[in-house]
Image: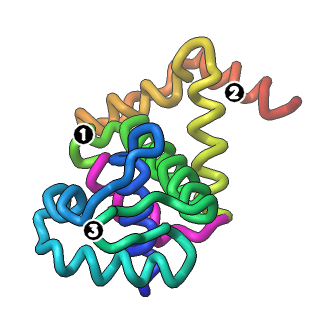
Amino acid sequence: MKRKTIEDYVELVYDLQKRGKRVHTNDIASALNIKPASVTEIFQKLDSEGYINYEKYSGVTLTSRGRNLAIRTKKKHQALKEFLILLGVDKQVAEKDACEMEHILDPTTMDIIIKFVEMINRCEITPFWLERFKRFVESGRLEECPPELVMLCQKVQKN
């Protein structure tokens, strides 16, 4: 089974599962707008691969392996979404793109993006260069960097 399919399903089960409540075929079918029979087939495969506990007519719960994968996938998704929004991408587009990107990026690339987002989120104020970049994205015109910022950047680079 494709990694994307596995990650999408365990993430959805994780989101739908409330305090140990079992997630049923119809819950997933409704969320994805697909036939319940298709969900049953995927559930059987996810069960055989150790991501869920599946009992026919009783629904599913995530195994620890499935829960860990869902949490990792959600973390990747959230970081990518925040990263794209930081760059000035519309929130809805960022959400959609993050869903695709979370499955295909190299783990090293993903780790760097997560660290970048964490660093920006820990800043007390938004870095001037990020605000400058957003204005460039919006206007298509790159403003000349003020001389005092050039001097500050040069000073920081020397250290």
**Please, what is the three-letter code of the amino acid marked with disc 3?**
Tyr
N-terminal of the pair, mark 2 or mark 1, is: 1
**Please, what is the three-letter code of the amino acid marked with disc 1?**
Asp
Residue 35 image point, x, y percent: 12, 74
Name the residue carrying label 2.
Answer: 153
**Residue 63 horizontal side relative to residue 132, left or right:** right
**Residue 3 horizontal side relative to residue 12, left or right:** right
Badge 2: residue crowd in 10 Å (few <14, some 14–19, many ≥20)? few
Q: Residue at x 55, y 56 (%)?
A: 67
Q: Residue at x 58, y 29 (%)?
A: 120
Question: Magenta span covers which residues?
Answer: 95-107
Label 2 element class? helix
Q: Residue 57: which disc?
A: 3
Q: Residue at x 33, y 63 (%)?
A: 58
Q: Residue at x 52, y 29 (%)?
A: 129
Which quadrant is the N terminus positioned in?
bottom left
